[in-house]
Amino acid sequence: MRPFDGRRILLGVTGGIASYKSVMLARQLTQAGAEVDVVMTRGALEFVGAITFEAVTGRRTYSEIFGPGNALDHIRLARDASIFVVAPATADFLARASHGHADDLLTACLLATVAPVLLVPAMNDRMWANAQTARNVAHLRELGHLVIDPDDGPLAVGEGQGPGRMPEPETILAHIGRVLEDRSMAGRTVVVTAGATREAIDPVRFISNHSTGKMGVAIAEAAWRRGADVTLVAGHLEVPVGAPVRIVSAGTVDSMREAVAEAVAEADLLVMAAAPADFQPSAPAAQKIKKREGEATPVIELRRAHDILESTIASRRDGCVIVGFALETENLLENSVSKLRQKKLDMIVANSAGEEGAGFGSDTNRVTIITADGAREDIPMMKKSDVADVILDRAGALMNGR
């Protein structure tokens, strides 16, 4: 099942250069199973054609409030929506919405809806900083609308950089998911680790592994959508983080251990999905190790790295659920059960290295979930985002049982 199956999304698009991103947002929503009704202002039509949205959604695009057959569009569209999203929301739209105007189809829909409203501003940084815009945004939030702050980044040509950019579609999608999710983890504090560590051999070389961080990032995003306060302790990631979680960078085993130790004291759930190194060079070279003719090949002496999961045992908060991961090339279940017991875990997610479509770098995974009471559940191959939901369903049940 896709995440937005059966959901009706009303997507408002106003007249800003960022409206090109709204096409991608509409496409991604449709691919996620939503029925997307797009309402465009006349200004938006100057930037993107209505037929573009029809092509990516497979549905009619709306723009006029007057004319034959249009009289009740604003009522029907507002009534049928699971969520009402306006992206981009220009300064002009925010002003009209804040003052309750209904002078076009989009603002009329806004007055008629009882669905949750998500507004995504995009404008020049000076317009965003203007005191009147700030008052309009504050009033809209007082009315119960969710307003996402714009990103800081490059603006229109010649305008430099600053706050005002519309967030990327993936981020908006995460916010929509947070509104529509069951909110089963609201009020919970979740700590997730993700990605590989890099242990220095010298200033330019390191020991690492093939982890991209996809699984851990998917879990952090899913927990955030469920309403949790999420900290992502991130090693080296090769994927973007599409939800506004708190990110603590931790590129080595030692820095990750310190970050986890600090975060776990307040955690209701700790998910150790990262791939920290088991071994690290015992004496990293201060300068680059040179390859010289006639010299012997250097020998790199390794030492055991700190075991991050084991180091948390003494500092775990009472009631905190601890989930570990095991990636094995042999004896998967035996090794996973041993790790679960040795590190006093509530649950371990076991997956096999080298299986096609699973493990490091893939978009899918096949895992076995084992709990401390000995229960075992084989999860078939599915997208890592779906595996993340299964893991959180099981971890959530353990939290609720305490």
Image: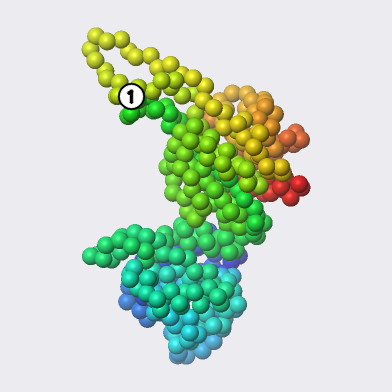
The vertical placement of 371 against 31, above or below, is above
- Residue 37's x, y, as percent? 50, 73
x 55%, y 75%: residue = 142
Pick the front one: 371 or 26: 371
**Does residue 93 appear in the picture of this structure?**
no
Which residue is rendered at x = 65% and y = 28% of the image? 339
Can residue 309 be seen here? The reply is yes
Check disc 1 and give the amino acid type. Answer: Ala
Q: Judge left or right: residue 55 versus residue 315.
A: left
Q: Which residue is mark 1?
A: 286
- Residue at the location (26% across, 66% down)? 159
Residue 102, x across and y down, in percent? 48, 87
Measuring 72% from the left and 44% from the top, which residue is drawn there?
Answer: 319
Quarter holding the N terminus? bottom right
**Residue 172, image x and y in percent?**
48, 62
Location of residue 160 by image quarter:
bottom left
Numbered disc 1: secondary structure: loop
